[in-house]
Amino acid sequence: MAMPDFTYVRPGSLSDACALASSLGADAAFIAGGTELIPDFQRERETARQLIALDHLPELRGIAEDGGGLCIGGLTTVSAVASSPLVRARSVALADAARAIGSAQIRSLATIGGNFCRAVPCADTPPAAIASGARVRLIGVHGTREMPAEEFFLGPRRTVLTSGEVLVAILLPAQPAGSGTSYQRFSRRKGASLAVAAVAARITVAKGRMQGARIVLGAVSPVPLMISAAAAMLEGERPSAALFAKAAAQCAVEALPITDVRGTADFRRELVSVLAQRAFEQAVERAEGRS
């Protein structure tokens, strides 16, 4: 698969990059690690012919504490997210999701912002970030805006980003006291393989009862899918295998899987049920300090 001809530009600043992308419109695409973008060119899914580099802008990289939470720059590599003690201390699920992506070589190039912005339904970090209550910060020619991460995705390969707008940071808030997170996925083989189904969960436990659960499915719907009904089943209840099975079944009912080369829709629904139970169990274990 040959690469098409394109123009490659390295603007001197983020504001210059946003202005250039805005003026070029649909013919422009931002590039950092390129691990999602380049394959899309090769598969003729990407039509932009003006590539605007962001990888040389240091203000878009890094993981910093921010009011008890974290500010993760959009150009921070997936490898850095996976290995960060700061990330693991606040959301083990997000670190685990980052570690699940591709090979070590891919993780060293891929960025968390790219994992969000390409909006591939089977992307690993968005469900885990959403389960942990993350927000996204966007900057463009019209200024800065923030929103809950679950509102960022509109459909497969579609986001709220407007022409010339950049995802500059993922904001991970301080997690509730007594909370635990988990990210569970299934792929057809170990190593660099895409998720067939995934479940992320955050559960808070206080005095033996669950509170404030957040459950997000990945790879089984057009966008990361929050399952509020299953979360409500857990609210105020004591953890139990029977309750987890019931809530997991609800997750499977609400999933919107497709049939493709990696699995049938029915198979994916069954996976969701199994993965959800595992996620609930591990999240509670972590909330109670048992793992």
Image (cartoon, rainbow, N blue to C red):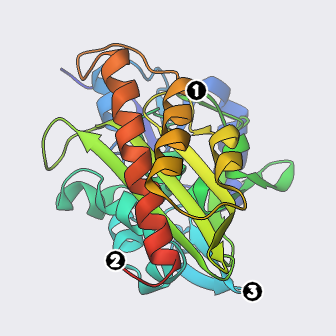
Does residue 69 appear to the left or right of 124 in the view shown?
Answer: right
The residue labelled by disc 3 is 67
Q: Quadrant for residue 40, please give it.
A: top left
Q: State the residue in front, 9 or 215.
A: 215
Q: Is residue 97 placed above or below 254 in the rendered structure?
A: below
What's the CA distance linking mark 1 and mark 2? 33 Å
Instruction: Name the quadrant of the N terminus.
Output: top left
Q: Residues within 10 Å of mark 3 (few under 14, many from 20)?
A: few
Q: Residues within 10 Å of mark 2 (few under 14, many from 20)?
A: some
Q: Position of residue 35 (x, y in %)?
A: 32, 45
Q: Which mark is drawn over residue 254?
A: 1
Q: Residue flagged by tag 1: what amino acid is it?
A: Glu
Instruction: Name the quadrant of the C terminus.
Output: bottom left
The residue labelled by disc 2 is 83
Q: Residue flagged by tag 2: what amino acid is it?
A: Ser
Q: Is residue 129 placed above or below 176 in the rendered structure?
A: above
Residue under the point 49% across and 58% down: 240
Q: Secondary structure at mark 3?
A: loop
Q: Secondary structure at mark 1?
A: helix
Q: State the residue in front, 207 or 214.
A: 207
Q: Quadrant for residue 209, please give it.
A: bottom right
